[in-house]
Structure formats: structure tokens, C-alpha cells
Image: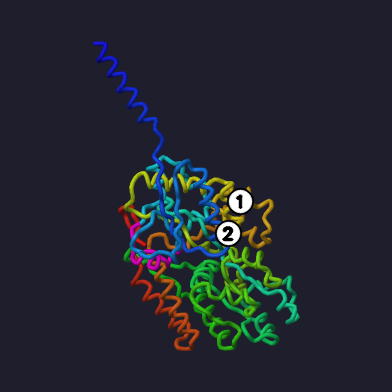
Amino acid sequence: MLRRVVLLFTCVVAIAAQAAKPAAPAEIVFRHAMTGEAAAALAELVGRFNAESGGDKVILQHLSLVTDPQQLPHLALLEDDEHQKFFAGHPRMLPLHKVMANANEKFDAAAFFPVVADVVDDNKGRIQALPLALSVPVLFYNRDTFRKAKLDPNKPPATWWQVQETAGKIYDVDRRCPFTSSNPAWVLMENVATQHGEPIAHAEQSGKSGLALNNLVEVKHVALLASWHKSFYFRYFGPGREADAKFLSGECSMLTSDSSLYLQLLRRKPFDFGVAALPHYDDVRGAAPGRVLPDGAVLWALAGKKKPEYAAAARFVAFLLRPEVQKQWVRGSGFLPMTPAAAEAMMGDSPAPEVLRLAVQRLSDKKYASAAKPKTVFGMSRVRAILSEELEAVWANLKPAKEALDTAVKRGNSVLQPMPTDGTVTR
């Protein structure tokens, strides 16, 4: 009898010890394509996590060093149109809210800025991916060139009509490149639509979503840009961030691009520069110039991994959401903070100019969360590629603005996909 009691007690102790045993550490691969200041900031954060994690290890894997893209990582920090070069296909992603729930890690969608959450949640308000590297579109300008053209360096153009006037005066003293833009499909199309109360996509009678990027404001804007291109006021360098380098070199005097470029300019100081809000049309009724769409790289979890690996990934995400960690990331990378707690931590000593401070403040205002952003479809990355192709036809004087945008909408509607309902996301 005593032997049975001892045996039972031993079993109970063993079971209790097993239940109390902490989760086994795991190694996870984190693939990214960051460069410059952002890459250095990311490496610093990962090093900090690995030192503090008690066994978990995140292995950073830069895209340029990947020999087999089909060998999938656990996490990937990618922009909307980068899935092909990241993975050589369209892998399944596991929504982040599921990863966190399965690991019993606290993860509240309400903790995020409403405008930031709007970028990464689904049509039910659930967070699909971590909005780690978002920016807003702004106007950068060369204050030295403004002075040379006898323009007030403290008064950048606020409207597109003022951009035209400014570009003309710059052209008189420097004909190389008065104005250019990076990511034109996002900056010059999607955000111009949002600023002026126009949807990017709308629901059709069939229940499907259809693009609306051929509205009057968009046609007017592309036609104006085309006239600038013919007059050499506007130069096009590519669909991505190619124009950034042209501005950094001093070749271009004005640039619309994402706000994270500010940190590079601040640290490198290639010349005296300024930052202003994205221009708008002041002759469009109901225009809301401050209503812009944050965009950039977000952190996805890939499907098909082991439970301990997902638990380690969840712990890493929880680490990234800590206010002091976000502060370190924002100050090192130039990207937007994800939560109000992080903003409060960094706004007091941030060197950011007023326009960027105001952009951060607007992240908490639900009226700036964009109803123009389509929530029920996937495929917007391919739509941007199509838009870029059609815009290039306009710049080459092969198509008028209306025909190019009508064609872009028709082609884009053919690649839109409905929101998956099985819990995974195909990118």
C-alpha cells in the first residue's frame, strides 16, 4: 500500500514539474529587405531580443543572401508587392492574431493607433500582420535650390498648383529635375484619391469590389503630371524608390516620397532640406489634405511551422510591442510608431519637424482611418504594378490620362481576389 502511495506521489510530482516547465526555446528565421539605417536598427533590436529572451533566437536573413526563396522563413517583413521575390510564389500567411492567441500572448487590436491598425486588420478588425515599418507620404524639398530660384525656403508649396509654379521657377535656374516622386502608384494615385474623398475601390452590384482610380480627380491629376512631364518640370525614374537617390544627390529639387526618408536626410545632411505635407487640390470640394494612407513593410507569420516556433515568434512580437523597444525602433529607423504608448515615449525628444509630428498625432484620430482602403479584397500589389505600367504609357505620351486609368481599372479588376475565409492569407 505504501509503495502505491509513493508511486502515485512520484507521478503527481513529475506531472506537476512537467506542467511548470517553461516553453522550450526555439530558433526562428526572420527574412527582410531593409537597407541602411533601418537594417542597422533591425539588427540591433534582434540582438537585444536574443540577449534577453532566455533561449529563443531570431536569425536575421537578408533577402539578398537567400539562395533558395522556396525555403520559407517563419517571419517576413515585406511590402505589399514583394511576395514574389521573397518567396518565388504566393505562400500562405497565418494571421498574427491567431499566432498570438495560440501562444497566450497579450495582443489587443485596440492598443494600436486606429490609422495604423487600418492598414493591417481584416474586415472584422483582427490584426493580420505587425505594422512595423510604415510611413506616410510627404514632400521633401531642397531649400538651397529654393533660395537660388528666389523662393522662400520657409514656404513650400501646399497645393499642386503651387508645385507647378514652384517647379517653373526652379526650372529657370536648374533644368535637371524640378520635381519627382517615389512610389507614384501609392503617393500620386492612392493618396491623392484619399485626400479628396475618393475611394480606391468600391463595392459593385455583384458583391465584388471594383477599382475607382479613374475618377475625375485622378484623371485631372495624371493629366496635370503629364503636362509637367512634357515641360520637364516632372521626371519619372521608376515605380519604386528610385527617385529618392535622385533627390539625395541634389539632382531633383522636390520629391514626394515616404516620411522615413527624413532620417536618412537628417543623418547624411547632403544639403539644407525641408519637409512639408503632401500637396493637395484646394479647388476640390470636401478635400481633407491630412487624410493620407500609411504604407510600407509589415511583419507576416508564414503558415506551416511548428507550435514551439510560433510560440517563439509570438514572444518576439510581444517584445517588439514594448514601448521602450518601439521607441528604439522608431528613432533608429524613422518609421511610424505603432501604439500611443510608443508615441508618447518618443515625441518629447524627437527631432521630427512639425509635419511629421502632426502625422503621428493623426494616427490616433479615427476620422483619418481611411474608408477608401479596400478591406474585402487582396491583389492591390498587382494593381499597383498595373497602375505603374499605365502611368509609364502616359509619361511616354502613348496614352492620354483617361484612357490609361480606364485601362488600369479594367486590368486591375481582373486581378483582385476576395478575402479568404479559411483563416490563412495568400499573398
In the rendered view, would you say 195 is above or below 246? above
**Cα separation between marks 2 and 1:** 14 Å
Q: Would residue 87 be counted in the magenta stretch?
A: yes
Quadrant containing the C terminus in the rendered view: bottom left
Is any atom of residue 55 visible in this view? Answer: yes
Quarter assignment of residue 15? top left
Q: Are marks 2 and 1 in contact (CB under 8 Å)?
A: no
Classify mark 2: residues with Cα within 10 Å, few (<14), some (14-19) or many (20+): many
Choose between 183 and 119: the one closer to the eye. 183
From the top left corner, tell me how far across and down residue 164 is, in percent.
Answer: 63, 81
| Amino acid at circle 2 | Ser
Which residue is pictured at 45% across the width and 48% down the height? 57
Q: Name which of mark 2 and mark 1 comes first in the sequence.
A: 2
Residue that badge 1 annotates = 343
| Amino acid at circle 1 | Ala
Quadrant containing the N terminus in the rendered view: top left
In the rendered view, would you say 350 is above or below 225? above
- Relative horizontal placement of residue 360, taking residue 92 as reference (left or right): right
SS class of the residue under badge 2?
helix
Residue that badge 2 annotates = 333
Is any atom of residue 286 visible in this view? Answer: no
Q: Would residue 235 be counted in the magenta stretch?
A: no
From the top left corner, tell me how far across and down residue 46 is, in percent.
Answer: 51, 52
Quarter assignment of residue 192? bottom right
